[in-house]
Image: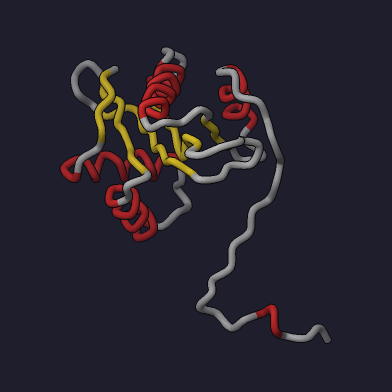
Amino acid sequence: MKIVEITSDRFSDWKRLRQAVSPDVNDDFHDREIELIASAADATAFLGLSENGEPIALLELTLRNYVDGCLGAPVGYIEGIYIDPGHRSAGYGRRLVHFAADWFRGQGCREMAADAELDNTRAQGFIRSLGFEETYRIVEFKRSLDAPDECTKRPR
C-alpha cells in the first residue's frame, strides 16, 4: 500500500471513504469538514492506495493542544482511520498507525491518541493491540451558540 497526502483532485475519493465510515452523516457536512481539514494548518489526511492506485484506506490526523490523559502539546490525534472491508486483515491498519506515529514525531509530538465509539469493540481492540492505553470513557455533547441560550432559562 502506498500512502499519499490528499490533494484537492482526490477529494471525491476522500469523501467516498468518509461516507463508508460515517454513512449517517450528510454530504454537506462531509464536504464542509473536508474543506476545513484541507485548509487547516494543524490537520491533514492521507489515502492508502492499492498496487493499482485504487484508494482503499483513509487516515485523518490532527495536532491537538489538549487530549485527556496526555501531558504536553502538541498531541498527535488520529481523527479517523478506515480500510475498505475487502482489504482488511492485511496489516494496512497497523501500517497506517505507524505512518501516523512517524508523521506526528516529525511535527514535534511526544504522544499520540485516538478514540473509538463506545460500542465499536473491534476498533477498541485494534487500537489497544497497537499499544494504546484507554484513558477515559465519556459521552460527548455539543450545543450551538446560535440558538437561544438555554443556560439563562429558569427551571419550572
On the image, the x and y values in percent for residue 80 come to: 45, 37
Q: Which colour scheme is used?
A: secondary structure
Nearer-the-camera pick, 91 or 27: 91
Res. 86 visible in picture: no
Residue at the far right: name it.
156
**Quarter of the rendering containing residue 33:** bottom left
On the image, the x and y values in percent for residue 54 come to: 23, 26
Q: Where the N terminus falls, by quadrant?
A: top left
* Residue under the image location 54 percent in, 74 percent down: 145
Q: 4 left or right of 19?
A: left
* Residue under the image location 58 percent in, 68 percent down: 143
On the image, the x and y values in percent for residue 94 come to: 46, 18
Q: 78 left or right of 32?
A: right
* Residue under the image location 43 percent in, 19 percent down: 98
Nearer-the-camera pick, 141 or 120: 141
* Residue under the image location 26 percent in, 39 percent down: 13
Q: Where the C terminus falls, by quadrant?
A: bottom right
